[in-house]
Amino acid sequence: MTRPIARWVCAAVLTNACIFGGSSTSSSPTFGFTAATCPGDVAASILGNVSCGFLDVPSRPDDASGAVDQVFVTRIQPETESTSDPVLTFGGDLGVSVDYGTFGRQATELHREVIVMDVRGTGHSHPSLLCPEIDAMPLAPAALPVDSRRTERAFVSAVSSCRDRLVAQGIDLASFDPAAMAEDAEDLRLALGIDRWSLLTMGTSSLVALELLRRYPDHVAAVILDSPQWPGVDPIAGAPASTQRAIAAMASACAEAPPCRAEDPSFSHDVRELERRLGTRPFTTVFQGDRVRLDAGWFILWLRAQLGFVRPPGTFLPGAIHAMARGDQDALRLEARRLFTRGSPVDQELCQMLLPNCWNDVVRNWGVDLTLACLERRSTSEAGRTRVPAMEEAFGGRFLDAACRAWGSGPDDEADGKTVSSDIPVLVVLGRFDPFSSVVAARHAVAGLSRVSVVISPVNGHQVTGVARTSAEQDPGACSVRLRDAWLDNPSASPDTSCLDRRTFDMSLPIDWQTPF
């Protein structure tokens, strides 16, 4: 539902009161934008021209009674003046703290203003849906299987405690969905006096961009969806199939490259052997004084996270898999401990089911993650159709179903099969090894986009265009960034994929297959 009263105030006449949050003569509430000092993490990450502020938004999307939340906004100017439409982004995956340094670089790369919006409930926005109750869970369940009842009970208890605390503060958890976030973005456009902007997303933030494309297409110039999640797609139910496709893609790439074949002559066989062996006799070690168990289910979560993290200049994954399959104790010990580096295993478990890059030292907002995961959750039974025990343990989803009941959020049935129809130019960028963003789901989801281009990077996992390290001509990460930037300057044309062309892209050169063992 839209916000009829507040929006018409801003749209009718864009006064200083509307833009800067001052008083209004209207009896209806005005939700405006107020400048603020940039927090330390923003100022330290962006060296260029940056400004910050808060957008007042109604606490409930369909309520103009006057109750407001605050959405934090960062505006990053390029080094040179730009006459192009600005770019709106929501960071990376929703619920993950924003890497402001990345978007600072993008303003320069794109030669236009980049506006970063911390969606409601996240980052510096108020209120926050952080769940310290989940983060505080002990390490002990690492000695248990992924789907243990003990883990489920502990997790559901932490979820219930977080929910009760937030509800007691008067927070309506149902107001933190992609539709509400899209309405916030439209209010921001009006408050800033922007006629049109382009949208740039990575990961699950695509859900907000697609809502904007559905609701307000007249004000969207172009859309870039890097490793998107699609509405109506259950990320847990689809995880076994997408993970198996990513494993097959890595096996194929390794077979094509002599240096990788030297590291692991039979990647797929080694993966199956590890699933079988760890399923019957888990590897155990001690980490930070606690017993850690690497069984088949935890191995699959580790493997999925590693596949998502593949990016130039290379990956040690094939070498690590081969060493583990040979029974190398040092390799098994290192990777078992790596799985729990960040702390709570439930934190790791939920993260690696839903999100990539779980070893990054970033703040994860489990309240928002739970809301989104529960909205897209469809059926526990779908997850087990692969008949692979390791996949069933890793992605059975029983504990998430129980958590969704405790959180009080269920599936958005209206999202089933929902596709966006639009003639706005859209660029979809996928990584060849990405086990989180399904190529199969993308083929179905883009059916209603009449001007869509889909590009698959041959050397990436999840999030292709946000990880370039250099602008060197031979850097495959920089190639994807250049492709993105050039397309945004001329979205009516097909993207120039020549630098990614497999006929001229020697897989043995851009990927470093060396193992640390």
Image (cartoon, helix red, strand yellow):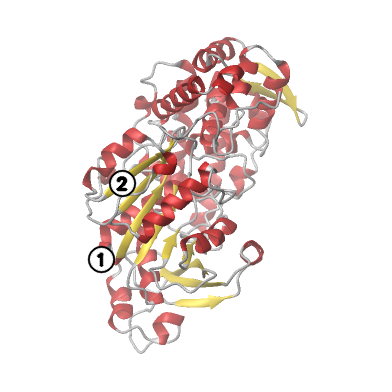
| Mark seen at residue 378 | none
Q: Which residue is mark 1?
A: 218
Observer able to see residue 145: no
Q: Is residue 210 above or below residue 59?
A: above
Observer able to see residue 243: yes
Which of the two marks, 2 or 1, is nearer to us in this view? 2
- The amino acid beneath tag 2 is Ser
| Mark seen at residue 453 | 2
- 10 Å crowding of disc 2: few (<14), some (14-19), many (20+): some
Q: Is residue 385 above or below residue 84?
A: above
Q: What residue lies at 37% left-to-right and 42% top-to-bottom?
A: 455
Frontmost residue, 355 versus 56: 355
- The amino acid beneath tag 1 is Asp
Q: Quadrant of the N terminus?
A: bottom left
Query: Looking at the picture, how far across and down is residue 60, in whole percent?
Result: 38, 63
Q: What residue lies at 41% left-to-right and 67% top-to-bottom?
A: 86
Query: Looking at the picture, how far across and down is residue 288, in whole percent?
Result: 76, 32
Frontmost residue, 344 versus 106: 106
Q: What residue lies at 28% left-to-right and 42% top-to-bottom?
A: 445
Q: Quadrant of residue 208?
A: bottom left
- Residue 184 appears left or right of 315: left
